Image (tube, rainbow, N blue to C red):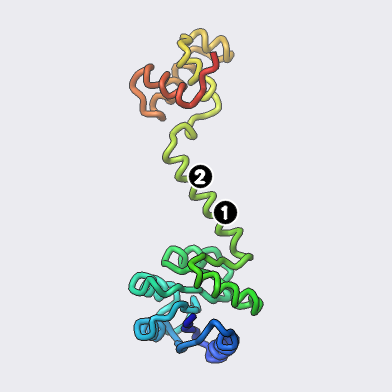
Amino acid sequence: MKVVIADDHAVVRAGFAKIINYQPDMEVLETAADGHEAYSIVAKTSPDILLLDVSMPPGENGLITTGKISEDFPNTKILILTMFDEEEYLFHVLKNGASGYLLKNSTEEEFLSAIRTVFQGDIYIHPKMATSLVREFVNQYQDVKNVDDPYTLLTTRELEILPLVAKGYGNKEIAEKLFISVKTVEAHKGRIMEKLNFKSKPELVEYALKKKLLNF
């Protein structure tokens, strides 16, 4: 596989190149000291992998370069090499099209494994950062779930009242069952209809059946 290395430190570029060129299935085509140079080299050589430092002052940073290269040269996989173990950087580069995120303090074995993983079309995330990524995914999933299903907006009391209303109980009967006032029942019913965006009781009954809330 053909590799390009982009890092603002010459000694780092040389060290990575030595490790890569020692592998029978890898070859470093060229190296770059900043984002602009990295873009030009990728355009000229069409490498399989670009190893890209996320911070390369004073030129264009790796976040911007990642977005440009992933958009203009989608066949080149980008593996981010960085000292930053912060969630913000991880999320930004992945959203911009990077295929991997590797910390520079990784072992040589992890380094080579990351390159091969990305080359095969998979995503590589440094183990230390994987937990952050999973947590973010869970949070985003929960946010989407809450938006898509208004059922999750209902309070515990509203979840008690909804099936009783669907079964045909009157306000007074519900109030007696739950030991609350009739006015409280009416208020909860109004909020249920508003949250679920229903205009009639048949809609509520149909919804309760769909959610398997009715146990006769």
Which residue is more in the foreground, 191 or 117? 117
For residue 167, say whether it is visible: yes
In the rendered image, residue 81, in percent from the top left (x then y), is placed at: 54, 76
Query: What secondary structure is marked by label 1?
Result: helix
Residue at screen point 48% across, 10% down: 169
For residue 6, say whether it is visible: no
In the rendered image, residue 100, in percent from the top left (x then y), is placed at: 52, 69
Give yes or no for contact between labels 2 and 1 (Cβ–Cβ under 8 Å).
no
Cα–Cα gap, marks 2 and 1:
11 Å
In the rendered image, residue 84, in percent from the top left (x then y), is placed at: 56, 72
In the picture, measured across the screen, residue 33 lies left or right of residue 85, that is: left
Classify residue 77 by image quadrant.
Answer: bottom left
Which residue is more in the foreground, 96 or 170? 96
Residue beneath disc 2: 142
Residue beneath disc 1: 135
| Residue 131 higher or lower than 33, as above or below | above
Query: Which quarter of the image is occupied by the C terminus?
Result: top right
Residue at screen point 51% across, 74% down: 80
Residue kind at label 2, given as amino acid type: Gln
